[in-house]
Amino acid sequence: MAGRIPCLKVIHLLLLSFLMVPFLLLLTLQRTRMDPLSLLNLQVSTRASLEFKVLEESTRIIDEGDEESALHSLIQEQSNNNTEVNTEDLAANKELEQHRHVAGQIVIILIVLVFLFENLLQIRLCFLDIVTDDTVSKTTIACDFSQRRTDTCVLHGDVRILPSSSSVVLVRTPHDTLPENAAYSLRPYARKWETPVMELIRPISIGAVSAAQECGVHHAVPVVVFSTGGFAGKNFFHDFSDVLIPLFITSFHYRGRVQFLITNFNRRWVGKYAVILSRMSDYEVINLDGDERVHCSGKAHVGLMSHSELVIDPARTPGNYSMADFRELLRSSLSLKRRSIGEGKNYYSKPRLLLMLRKGSRELTNKREVVALTRKLGFKVIVAGPEQTKNLSRFAGVVNSCAVMMGVHGAGLTNMIFLPEKATLVQIIPWGGLRYACNHDYGDPTAAMGIRYLEYEVGREESSLVKQYPKDHPVFTDPESVHRQGWNAIWAVFLNRQSIKLDVKRFKGVLQEAMRSFLSR
């Protein structure tokens, strides 16, 4: 398969390097045994012996011969001495050359060893790709349209992604078992029950073909195709619930060795969450909109797996990952300092309470009274509105420094995902029989995050609806009758038109419970 080629090249290169190490060591030892210096010493020793005999003979000539013969012998002796000095110099040069040669081989061995060490991770990942299902040779398309939240398809084999036709195809092989009519379509966004939103998501057609266009770009890792359309970039809650958490569930078991391909590309959304995306994938995200190239891979996920709002079910994830793992990824990505409220703070220090304020719908109209009460009970209060939340990294750090976060039901409460463990979320639930829905969005997810949860249901007199409807109106006497009219009615009456004025005396008990929760951590 195409995805294996780069890994095989790396493996071949590393195997060659492994073979070079013993070869170079053997060569170095062999050259040391066959050291020319040893032969040179033997030559010098033999020559010295001969010269000694010549000197003895010269002595006899001086005793027996004339002065001319003696002078000749002395000259010959001096010549021999010079020869011996030259031989010693040659030996020294040879020894230096040998040392340089051995040093050079040692340097080469060290370079090879460093290369092997630096590529241990790469070789491990390559072997991992080969032995796992990422590169299985079986040609398959497995789609799941049975889930309430999302549709997904996983393709193994020679996969081609064709952005120009919004299609992902699998090239047939002579022995595959794909049905003749293998053709599917899905919208890769995890909110399929909301039809008006899903109509904004570009559909992707999926099928099998006997022949496909030539590859324009090869991806040696699996690819994930998803959309940043819909609510993405418009609502903080949906950024996480519809995209980031499903993307984590779908891709994190690849440990970064995965390529993200995005349709309905939202440049602002990608920029905002770039630091988080870079922790999920080692590769730059690719915008499929307007891309004319054919992308090829050995495996493709189309659509994202999703379990519930801000929830990860470990039993349904490929690597048994949990919300704790996702929160750890966020802490690492955003450099959040505290894992638990007990870290880095004195036990008896004044706990910080973050009050999330809304503008327009579900606005808290007596915030000054609430802040005063909160301070009186011993909290250090931090007030944050929409403007303060725009810088993701900075505001995540603020949330992470707090022991309590409080606010009226709304997207801003999603910031609880940055709270340290053992912190407390206080959700103020508007009037209108909304307890189940509010719990589903923010109450239920807190347990898996290691966060404590408190809630406060607004009474009829605390709601601005008392100024809009008579007290005997079904809005007050039978809120469920509004629910039966559908989501649009719920939104229009209870969520979009309601502001809240808290009864601080009634609300005091909730804040006292939050303080007790902090002190008992």
Image (tube, rainbow, N blue to C red):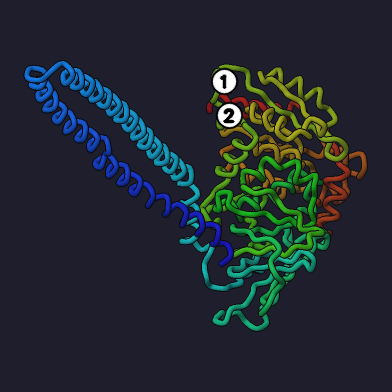
x and y percentages locating residue 235 in the rendered image: 79, 45
Q: Nearer the viewer, mark 2 or mark 1?
A: 2
Q: Nearer the viewer, residue 300 or 101?
A: 101
For the residues bearing labels 2 and 1, Cβ distance under 8 angstroms: yes
- Residue 185, placed above or below residue 41: below
**Residue that label 2 marks:** 338
Residue at position x 62%, y 25% in the image: 515
Q: Is residue 280 above or below residue 333?
A: below
Query: Label 1 amino acid?
Result: Lys
Q: Which residue is mark 1?
A: 345
Tell me the residue at 71%/63% (across/down): 216
437 to the left or right of 69? right
Residue appearing at x 67%, y 50% in the figure: 309
Residue occupying image coordinates x 64% and y 62%: 301
* Within-10-Å neighbours for mark 1: few <14, some 14–19, many 20+: few
Q: Amino acid at mark 2?
A: Arg
Residue 70 shown left or right of residue 446 in the figure: left
Dot 2: few (<14), some (14–19), or many (≥20) neighbours within 10 Å?
some
Q: Residue 7 versus residue 317: which sits nearer the camera?
A: 7
Farthest residue to the bottom: give it: 180
Q: Is residue 23 left or right of residue 269?
A: left
